[in-house]
Image: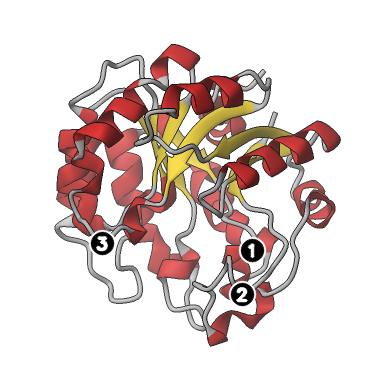
Amino acid sequence: MKIDSHQHYWHFNTADYGWMGDNMSVIKRDFLPTDLLPELKSIGFDGSVAVQARQSLEETNWLLQLADEHPHIKGVVGWVDLQSEQAEVQIAAFAQHPKAVGVRHVIHDEEDIDFMLRPAFIRGVQLLEKYNLAYDILIFPKHLPNTIEFVKQFSEQQIFIIDHIAKPLIKDDIVSPWKEDIAALAQFPNVYCKVSGMVTEADWNTWTPENIRPYLDIVFEAFGPERILIGSDWPVCLVAGKYSEVMQVVIDYISNFTEKEQALMLGGNAAKAYRIK
């Protein structure tokens, strides 16, 4: 099974999606499962993991409803209030759904750079292991040192997945200290990495696969083919390229790997990390 491990759905409105700037008009509309399905089919993929784009229980429940209605949604990474005293109640309710596979919080939008090290937040994430849910880590490179300290707080049974290779400064051709920090984080065997969201960290108008290759080299050396997941970050990726063209960057990059290794990166690792059946 080939799985796009990272994409979003939304009914567009300016209140919920104020982060979309004037240069992002191409994604200022509704994006729903019927829009993604032909894109998946065009590259021979079987399904995807839908990831939260709003931090609300309403969003999480809506994504689960979409998953009930559309078989190509193989899993949902939702949001719950991990700092709440009701965190476990919310997690338990979410985990009851067979397509609930993970939880995410938009760390990189928090003003407090130490947000993920707050005791209340760590307690909330620690509850996920009990319910077999992964945790998606959405950060900027500046958060990587704290992320290393964060991951140390957990057993190796808790699966972590780095979104968008931690958003290195591809447009500015800056590698360090992201390179060293991502290598240190990869030393934890329960941390996986999504090769997704890279084109939007490059120059949207002039990027080429060659701009992205050095960053892929670093991530693949750090994590190896057993802990890398392919993801599109559709529809956000559309600001920089077509769906098939964005996915092809990684598909071409891994073409020299063995068939077994390619199968892992194109879906097997997503199925394992997210416990997709």
Q: Nearer the viewer, residue 203 or 140?
A: 140
Q: Nearer the viewer, residue 145 or 110?
A: 110
Residue behind mark 3: 111
Q: Residue at x 33, y 45 (%)?
A: 219
Residue behind mark 1: 245
Residue behind mark 2: 14
Q: Is residue 241 left or right of residue 130?
A: right
Q: Residue at x 76, y 48 (%)?
A: 40
Among numbered discs 2 and 3, the one appearing first in the sequence: 2
Graded by Cα atoms within 10 Å as few (under 14), some (14 to 19) or many (20 or more), the crowding at tag 1 reads: some
Look at the numbered disc 1 and give the secondary structure of its residue.
helix
Q: Name the colour scheme.
A: secondary structure
Graded by Cα atoms within 10 Å as few (under 14), some (14 to 19) or many (20 or more), the crowding at tag 2 reads: few
Q: Is residue 216 left or right of residue 177?
A: right
- Residue 50 % position (x, y): 64, 43
- Residue 24 % position (x, y): 58, 79
- Residue 51 % position (x, y): 58, 45
Establish if 256 lies above or below 160: below
Of the residues shown, which amino acid type is indicated by label 1? Glu
Of all residues, the one furthest to the bottom in this rendering is: 22
Q: Is residue 152 left or right of residue 221?
A: left
Among numbered discs 1 and 3, the one appearing first in the sequence: 3
Determine the CA span between mark 2 and mark 1. 28 Å
Of the residues shown, which amino acid type is indicated by label 3? Glu
Q: Nearer the viewer, mark 2 or mark 1?
A: 2
Asked if residue 264 shows in the view, the reply is: no
Among numbered discs 2 and 1, the one appearing first in the sequence: 2
